[in-house]
Image (cartoon, grey):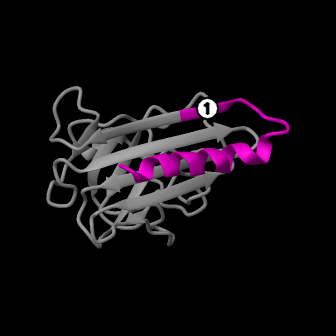
């Protein structure tokens, strides 16, 4: 993935440059994998190989600092060309089904489950990484939120069937869970 080094540098600069004078601790996370069928111990799983083919790859890079919030980048390769996908940070690691990853991680949790209220299900309270692939099946997304993880953390990024909806009653929904990558945020 030749694009990855420039993505890493861009994400690092986006987080570090504003706070150079009064730098606060920075928490960096990277995770990557090749999507396979589920097996115990798998960290990158496709549930719909027709939409996220076996052998497709994903890489997540996230930087957090109190002065800058959290910037997360997602790079995917080997997906269907010219297609839009949704993707979000989820509360649990990947499992045998897409549901194993649990709901989206929300900085301020919605007391109503499932969360479809745009007050909670929005790209400021969650990490949304929607992307569209190019003619080669490569996609890129970046999310920046003004918060950092505390004791509660996300544990995966799930790729969804469609871009994320924002209207009341459907906010945060993005169709079926197609694939999952474990990420130790």
Number of numbered discs: 1
Secondary-structure class at tag 1:
strand
**Height in image: 16 above or below 79?**
above
Q: Nearer the viewer, residue 10 or 27?
A: 10
93 sits to left or right of 38: right
Most extreme residue toward the front is 2
Q: Is residue 6 magenta?
A: yes
Residue 26 in magenta? yes
- Specify the quadrant of the image occupied by residue 107: top right
The x and y percentages for residue 178 are: 25, 54
Res 155 visible: no
39 or 62: nearer the eye?
Answer: 62
Q: Position of residue 56 (x, y in %)?
A: 23, 51
Mark 1 surroundings: few (<14), some (14-19) or many (≥20) residues within 10 A: some
Choose between 120 and 9: the one closer to the eye. 9
Residue in the image at 23% along x and 26% along y: 41
Left or right: residue 13 versus residue 152 is: right
Overall secondary structure of the magenta section: helix
Q: Which residue is mark 1?
A: 27
Q: Which residues are magenta?
A: 1-28
Residue 181, image x and y in percent? 33, 41
Point out the residue furthest to the right here: 21
């Amino acid at each position: 993935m030749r694009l990855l080094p420039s993505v890493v540098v861009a994400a690092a600069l986006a987080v570090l440059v504003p706070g150079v004078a009064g730098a606060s601790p920075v928490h960096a996370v990277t995770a990557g994998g090749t999507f396979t069928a589920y097996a115990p111990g798998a960290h990158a799983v496709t549930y719909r190989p027709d939409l996220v083919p076996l052998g497709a790859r994903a890489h997540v890079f996230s930087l957090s600092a109190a002065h800058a919030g959290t910037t997360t980048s997602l790079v995917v390769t080997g997906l269907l060309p010219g297609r839009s996908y949704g993707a979000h940070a989820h509360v649990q690691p990947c499992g045998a089904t897409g549901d194993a990853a649990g709901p989206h991680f929300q900085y301020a949790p919605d007391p109503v489950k499932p969360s479809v209220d745009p007050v909670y299900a929005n790209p400021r309270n969650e990490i949304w990484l929607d992307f569209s692939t190019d003619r080669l099946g490569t996609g890129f997304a970046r999310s920046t939120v003004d918060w950092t993880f505390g004791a509660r953390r996300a544990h995966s990024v799930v790729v969804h069937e469609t871009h994320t909806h924002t209207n009341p009653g459907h906010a945060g929904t993005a169709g079926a869970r197609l694939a999952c990558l474990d990420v130790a945020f």
